[in-house]
Image (spheres, rainbow, N blue to C red):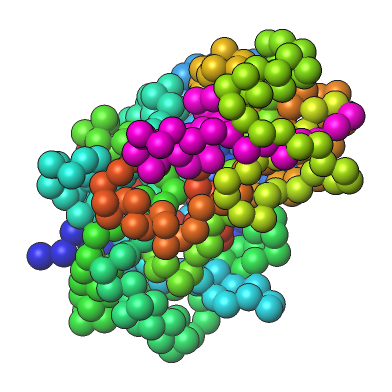
Amino acid sequence: MTVVHPIARAWITTGGTGAQNYDEFADDAEITAIIEANPHSALGIEMPHRAPESLGKSFLDALGDAVARLAEAKADGSYTPAEQVVVLYRISAPGEDSAYGLFAMVDTDQISTSADEPGLVIRNEDVFIAKVRERVALAEALGHLLSPVLLLQTGRGDELHAALAAATESAGAPAATDTDQAGRTHAIWLLGPGPQQDELTALAGGGELVVADGNHRSLAAQTGGLPRFLSVVTTPASVAIQPYNRLVSELTTTGDELLDRLRAAGATITPIDGPVEVPPAGGTVHLRLPGQGYAVTLPQDEGAARLENLDHALVERLLLRDALGLDPGDKRITYVGGDYPASWLTGEVDAGRAELAILIAPVTVDDFVAVNLAREKMPRKSTWFTPKARGGLVVAELPR
């Protein structure tokens, strides 16, 4: 029996509702600007307190606005209903290989967070519990899920990739398309009950599924007692991991003192002449302080587990916690995904809007999968997968 299932009652976009997921932004003002430009954007529902007409409200106080916006979108034809469907998904752009996925529901009781916890859905990244609580509250208020969890099929990924490519190629005109901020086209096709649906759900559930994006949403499904959660099951060949950097708005000490503290901890620091970019490989991180960049090799702990010596873990432990005294959830730290170039982060420092940019080389897909299958825990905010599944294309109505 597969752990991947059709969506019992889905609402499919008719166009104009697609959006980046709520956690893809470095600045909440960007969310407000997107909703203002496109009131039909699913972000107005996913982040209701950031919609122009709800500014000033807390997230919880704006939940009623989210409910009203979803009801209005369904009533005005922005979404059309479908039952017992999976949804074929293709992301394409000129000069790039197409990415494929399958919108479907996945059994929540299959989520496993440790080697001694049974289940085929592996989630091994630290989360911020406040974000989880918001997602639980939103799902309870709406009775619908708008943003999918991105799952990597690690056991039969190649078979699934080929099957999805063939299915989309023969499916005719898509039910809807949407263009993202990078110019990629997101296309979806509905697939109802029948042998092809059975084949694809079996392939999608035919091996361990690693949470690539949506750790908070998957934990929210568990915390909220949802029997199943909305997912896009994709393949390793469909994704890449981009850098996941950090921006610190306000230091707790001077830049010189920060460097002295890092040296005292055993770091090797070399000034960078010219632009500060993402390091070409792991082992060294790049810092941008006002007026100067640095290449920093943080000391590894030879007695620690390998994950404790990943660059993201060293930055969290040695730089943020020890040198700056900042908890990872401190509001002065912004986690900036790979959609933002190095020049944007360094520009924030140079413009005085931040005091430190930390640029970190990405981990590889192979390393990410290996770490998860070994049931080790990734540092929080360490993997930025692209392309990301778009929110607001397929909405799952939850059973009441």
| Left-right relation of 344 to 134 | right
Give the quarter of the figure containing the N terminus: bottom left
Q: Residue 203, relative to residue 169: is it above or below? A: above
Q: Residue 237, relative to residue 25: is it above or below? A: below
| Residue 156 appears in the rendering | yes
Give the quarter of the figure containing the C terminus: top left
Task: State the residue at coordinates (43%, 22%).
Answer: 130
Task: State the residue at coordinates (22%, 45%).
Answer: 111
Image position, residue 247 (x, y; %)? 68, 30
Between residue 8 and residue 116, name the one nearer to us.
116
Name the quadrant containing residue 114: top left
Task: State the residue at coordinates (46%, 72%).
Answer: 237
For the record, the magenta segment spans 291-318
Between residue 71 and residue 255, name the one nearer to us.
255
Task: State the residue at coordinates (62%, 68%).
Answer: 185
Between residue 243 and residue 192, name the one nearer to us.
243
Q: Residue 130, relative to residue 379: is it above or below? A: above
Image position, residue 387 (x, y; %)? 56, 60
